[in-house]
Image (cartoon, grey):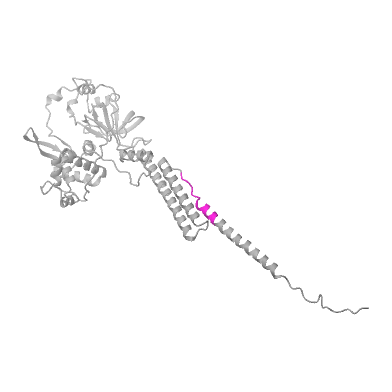
Amino acid sequence: MPDIIYTGRGLAPDIPSEGGKAMSRLSDFIVKAEEIKYNAFKETQDWFVKSQDVDPVMFLTTANQIAQDKLLKTYNEESSAILKASGNNLSTEDRARIIAGKNFLISEQQKMQADMARALQDRDAIQKDIQGNLDHDEFNKRWSDYVSGNASYGTEPLSPSAIDPDAHYSKLINKGHGTEGTISLTTNKGGISTTEKKSASATEEEARQMVASDILGNDRLALGYIEKFQKLKNTDPATYMKYLDTSGDQQVDATEEQAAETASNPIIRWAQDNYWQKRIIIKEVETTKPETKRSTFNWNIGIGVGNNRNRQYDDQGFANFNKLKVNSWLDLGRDAPSAKDRQIQDYVDTETGEKKHFGSAAEIKIVGYSPDRDMIIVKITKTSENRELREGDYIGLSGDKYKDWLESKPFGIDRDSLLKQYGQSTTYRIPPLLKKPEKSGVVWAIPKSIPTK
């Protein structure tokens, strides 16, 4: 048997190949790096897509829709440019710039939404303003500009409407009362001055205080005075300068402008000089009428051309009851009996000028009669059960339908004679509403104190 020579084969341990493992680890590293890179890219893309998610808003006007479209387009283009410049790897600064652009876009949307809400709120207020306390002309212009092209409606509150002082004081209910007595009024006609004694419901000083108090306590009336005074600048510059130019140098300097904010306010002084007589009731001094004027009247025979008390009532001329304008006016209030229930069918609402149907009894007091409108004016003294007619309201009633009220005691008025005298027919007519005064510039602050004469 041959000798077996020991070679040691199979006894040495296996030595692993490091080259294969190194290649495997390198491959894993490359795959991991690509995975990290992809995840970063995907996160950037997901974040960017989310940043572009801005909900469009439905706006009332085309101008707002166009403005929003431009904002959205600008934002998308600018943020896309930032993403491209970063190589799809947005830095913290890049993201901050994109977020700032988005916040600006949303804030502009919110501004336009608030603008639209304000416009709709004002439109609702105007529709409910049946008494004309707000300036409808100003709103109509703002609304028209807004819906026809202006991107912004504006945040300014609705302006109050101006009250024309002449129209205001023509209403009997706005006349003031103080110390009743006789006053002397001097008038100049054709260069001839005459002084007459008149009966007045207050003294001149009291009337002047009333005018000033009206201006300080009623913004709408103050605006009316301001507009009238400003018109003098073109219509009567001499009078305008008379109240402003206290130094007499035919200029309005800074000192004189400051005086307009004190008790010597030129508008108040002008208003007192020109409106104190209109602020109170001034009549001819009453004298006892000859007995012959009353001796022909007899309650026991029918009211007619030859038998009436028409001459017992003086025409008070132009007057307003809320928005109801009359050009002739007989004051029946002094003779009217105490308020009592009377059946009323149709009436004219003096707030709107509309003819309405009531068809029930109401507690009223007769105030007067207008031959010009053939209308009896009555005051509601107790709110009706259905609350349609409220205490203190004035309504107009057809002279034709309720003429028996005029003929009955204590009035004894022959309506037909008055209508012929004023050249009117007996057809019942709804009078027009008063027009608001045109707006003009507004200057000068109104002081908080009342100047004296």
Q: Is residue 132 visible?
A: no
- Residue 340 percent location from the top left of the image: 30, 33
Q: Nearer the viewer, residue 208 or 78?
A: 78
User: What's the magenta region?
Assistant: 44-57
In the rendered view, does 304 fall on the left or right side of 12?
left
Number of numbered labels in the structure image: 0
209 and 252: which is toward the camera:
252
The residue positioned 47% from the left and 46% from the top of the image is 56
Residue 179 painted magenta: no
- Residue 440: horizontal and vertical position, in percent? 24, 40
Residue 54 magenta: yes
The correct choice, above or below, for 300 with respect to 380 in the image is: above
Q: Which is nearer the eye, 314 or 137? A: 137
Establish if 343 lies above or below 74.
Answer: above
The image quadrant that residue 6 belongs to is bottom right
Q: Quadrant of residue 426?
A: top left
Q: In the displayed orientation, state which residue is furthest to the front.
A: 2
Query: Dividing the picture into quarters, in which one does residue 199 lie?
Result: top left
Rendered position, 438 above or below 369: below
Q: Is residue 5 above or below residue 444?
A: below
Q: Viewed as shown, does residue 204 lie left or right of 361?
A: left
Q: Quadrant of the N terminus?
A: bottom right
Q: Residue at x 12, y 39 (%)?
A: 182
Q: From where the camera sits, is residue 27 visible?
A: yes
Question: Can you give x and y, in whole percent of width and height, for residue 338 in the image?
Answer: 26, 34
Q: Position of residue 152 (x, y in %)?
A: 37, 44
Among all residues in the image, which is located at the extreme left? 192
- Compare residues 263 and 247 and report the one nearer the observer: 247
